[in-house]
Image (tube, coloured by chain):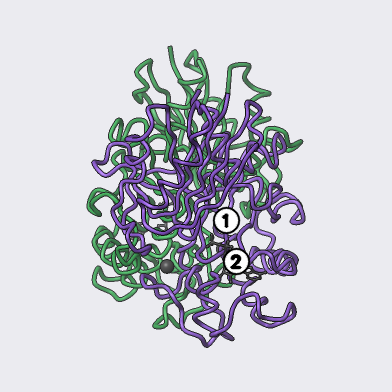
Chain colours: A green, B purple
């Protein structure tokens, strides 16, 4: 028995096949070009397996409201050629097996909840700090979302008085993604995020912004764990800086687990998303 | 068959008895003085009824972690005489019937979800804007909380450039409660919140702060409804101001229900909390 998992991103589609134990037995990365071209390669990859079900974790924004006429469509994505594309529909046309769809970050959160930090937590919030910033929240095994999926990367926070660079979000004057995502760093400083020295002041600002957001997530949903993944978090010096800043901003106001166990990296590393997709697939059967 | 409900507040304990249909048949308000005095009056009120169960919605912070040795204790409350008081323990000592405990705002959120806006929503977030600011979030019938109960009144937001008054929270430099609660208004402007004219500029600032918070709640949990209650929200002119400001700050970024149906007052009015307590009691039997 095999499960299919697809982490559909704006740069690449990571596809994997899992066995009965939901362990990955084959994985490929397919560049995101046009929908037809990319999906044909995806379909081709899965051809040699008799899949039972598929789990998709997609980039967004994507319509996840089952009652909506555009359920399963990518909506206003800036990725050319994919605006208003019926992603779920394309899979339903090709396959008759059960298919589950959620966001890439919900899938990663789910992967970490079920497999990464398995058994040690009842809730977790996963935040990816990459090209953009996005998050998912799992509570007691459920992906928490309502009228649509979360967009917690865009919460409004306060600009640091020492920060004189413009905020780079087309929608918001002062949002987290516009100040702390990898692409906003590039746009603001005209330099790749990975080109800054480990001890550059930009990491202090980065930690300050992420800590502000984490204070708010904590006060609103009180997760057992906050998991930070994505390219920017490869800067490991960020973790202690964020924990320190969190402590200062939270002001000892609510209890949290020990910060070293509370604000952490993904246990599954870059596999969090694809493992989440496979797990969601396995639960359909 | 009767249920007991107790909305335990820092100023008063509202106690009610509900019948089988969870309709209120008697209700009293008991001033909050010392634990012994107040609870004796509470116990006395319930004496003439053969209750099946009790639901308590309490002011906080209160330890709701069932695994904690201080489960059911009020913790660091500023209310004199009630710090570290074992509220749940006092009821368990008196009664052998099942007792459910949550926060006052979780109870109000639950009341509005189950009874107020019954059937029309799958999730709602209730925010009380009174002496303090607090909130609860219900999703698919569950009260969402994790390591502890939410404290969403204290999220960090941005001070308005036109606002030159100090922020009044002992814990946070820039939190919602410190800028927008009734008591912070009094402390900041040295005037009761209800003494300002309906068209005073303070309501614009108030709407701005609440809108910022509502943008963040929306992006993080995407509720079907945001319900605003509490003394300060008696200023009905706030609702359209908040909706306008929400629109500006959100920048058309995610879909929400029509704002007139999204940002609303409590359908149960001041009974939201006590109805929630009675409903929680009824579910224990
Ligand atoms: N070692 C690194 N240090 C800092 N930033 C990095 C590093 N590696 C990648 N990034 C940044 O992370 C972003 C890409 O994030 P990633 O999570 O890999 O992809 P995506 O978000 O597109 O799925 C880019 O902005 C890149 O500059
Ligand atoms: N009509 C009103 N307009 C503005 N503020 C009001 C009004 N009524 C009460 N308040 C304010 O609301 C706060 C009390 O909130 P309330 O919800 O009644 O009680 P509590 O939060 O203590 O349970 C006080 O700060 C009071 O000044
Ligand atoms: Zn934004
Ligand atoms: Zn505060």
Q: Residue at x 33, y 31 (%)?
A: A115
Q: Dots 2 and 1: beta carbons under 8 Å?
A: yes
Vertical comparison of A25 with B281: above or below: above
Q: What count of labels does the image hold?
A: 2
Q: Nearer the viewer, residue A229 or A182?
A: A229
Ligand 2 positioned in quadrant: bottom right
Answer few, some or many: residues within 10 Å of disc 1's Cα (few below 14, many 20 plus, some between 14 and 19). Answer: many
- In the rendered image of this protein, does residue B156 appear above or below residue B285? below
Q: Quadrant of residue A239?
A: bottom left
Checking the image for residue B127, the label placed there is 1
N-terminal label among 2 and 1:
1
**Other-residue count near label 2 (Cα within 10 Å), few / some / many at <14 / 14–19 / ≥20:** many
- Residue B248's place in the image compared with B43, above or below, is below
Instruction: Residue at 36% x, 64% y: name it.
Output: B78
Mark 1 chain: B
The quadrant in which residue B265 appears is bottom right
Q: CA distance from mark 2 to mark 1?
A: 10 Å
- For residue B210, the mark is 2
In the rendering, at what x and y percent does residue B98 appear?
42, 28
């Amino acid at each position: 028995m095999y499960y299919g998992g697809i982490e559909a991103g704006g740069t690449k589609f990571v596809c994997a096949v899992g066995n009965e134990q939901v362990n990955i037995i084959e994985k490929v990365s397919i560049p995101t070009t046009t929908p037809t071209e990319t999906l044909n390669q995806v379909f081709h990859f899965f051809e040699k397996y008799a899949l039972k079900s598929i789990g998709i974790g997609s980039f967004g924004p994507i319509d996840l409201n089952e009652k909506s006429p555009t359920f399963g469509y990518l909506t206003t994505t800036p990725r050319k050629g994919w605006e208003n594309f019926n992603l779920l529909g394309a899979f339903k046309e090709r396959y008759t097996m059960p298919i589950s769809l959620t966001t890439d970050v919900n899938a990663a959160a789910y992967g970490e909840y079920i497999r990464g930090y398995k058994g040690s937590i009842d809730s977790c919030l996963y935040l990816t700090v990459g090209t953009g910033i996005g998050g998912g929240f799992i509570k007691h095994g459920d992906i928490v979302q309502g009228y649509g999926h979360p967009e917690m990367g865009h919460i409004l926070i306060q600009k640091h008085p020492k920060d004189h660079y413009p905020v780079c979000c087309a929608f918001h004057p002062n949002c987290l993604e516009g100040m702390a995502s990898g692409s906003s760093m590039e746009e603001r400083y005209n330099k790749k995020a990975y080109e800054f020295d480990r001890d550059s002041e930009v990491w202090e600002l980065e930690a300050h912004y992420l800590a502000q957001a984490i204070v708010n997530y904590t006060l609103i949903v009180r997760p057992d764990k906050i998991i930070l993944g994505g390219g920017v978090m490869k800067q490991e010096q960020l973790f202690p800086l964020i924990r320190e800043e969190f402590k200062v901003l939270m002001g000892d106001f609510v209890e949290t687990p020990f910060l070293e166990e509370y604000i952490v990296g993904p246990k599954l590393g870059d596999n969090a998303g694809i493992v989440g997709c496979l797990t969601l697939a396995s639960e359909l059967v």
